[in-house]
Image (cartoon, rainbow, N blue to C red):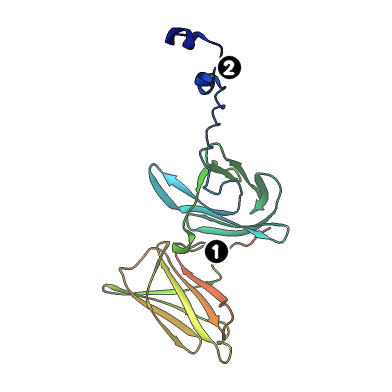
Amino acid sequence: MDLTSRLSAPCGVALLLAACAEEPPTPPPAPPCAGAGVESLVGDWVATSGARVDLTTRLRITRQDAGLSLQWVRGSARAALTAPAGGPGFEATLDGQPFVGQLHPERCTLVVRAGEAAPVELLPSLKGDAVPWATCTEAAELRAEGDRAVLSATAQAPLPEGCVGEAALYLDERRVDGALTIDGPRWSVEVAAAAPGKAELHRASRCGEAPPTPLGVACVGHDAPSAVQ
């Protein structure tokens, strides 16, 4: 049998088994958000403005018992809400208005509607450690001294005996390092920075090896705190 005859022989010929074997099906394309964690609502979400992240509108979702805990930030307003867990979305109430979210994994977005305001699309995977989430509990005082700023707050209760105070300072939505001073009920942090539009002092106490206990969030430039169901 010449070469031409071999090539025209049935596929049972060992030489052509590989060529005649049925090719495996092409795997389906990976979803756009594969590996981004959007298969779950839980996580940090942030708006964008063009190609830039817009930190003034963001949402943190965590599990709370059988439901969800929502930390919503939009401009100078913040709210802490809870919602039942069920499906790729949530429904809650904010200031008497519906507050709903719907996950769209094919677009990697979470669409949030707050009352009559226009819906906003949020993207996943915000690194939340650099920005504040907790609602404000009290007012702070901001004093600018040239190229330095001092943020102060008066605690309602002294530190527990044997505990030390800790504080995180945020200026214009970004965490910065500063020198903490505690003088009785007075907590102050001084930092090298121009006077910010917004400032927050997150106070906590650390007692022994236990995790820090939040004591309060003192703010300048934010709306009144809101905590709703």
Dot 1: what SS? loop
Q: Is residue 208 above or below residue 37?
A: below
- State the residue position of label 2: 12
Q: Nearer the viewer, mark 1 or mark 2?
A: 2
**Would residue 165 be found to the left or right of residue 68 on screen?**
left
Q: Position of residue 220 (x, y in %)?
A: 45, 68
Inspect the image, locate mark 2, and give the three-letter code of the amino acid beneath it.
Gly
Identified at 56% across, 54% down, the residue is 43
Residue 224: give its label: 1
Q: Is residue 1 above or below residue 123?
A: above
Visible in this render: residue 96? Answer: no
Q: Is residue 5 above or below residue 112?
A: above
Residue in the foreground of this view, choosing between 123 and 150: 123
Inspect the image, locate mark 1, and give the three-letter code of the amino acid beneath it.
Ala
Q: Position of residue 202 (x, y in %)?
A: 50, 73
Q: Position of residue 36 (x, y in %)?
A: 52, 47
Visible in this render: residue 97? Answer: yes
Q: Position of residue 153 (x, y in %)?
A: 47, 78
Residue 8: give its label: none
Mark 2 closeness class: few <14, some 14–19, many ≥20 residues within 10 Å: few
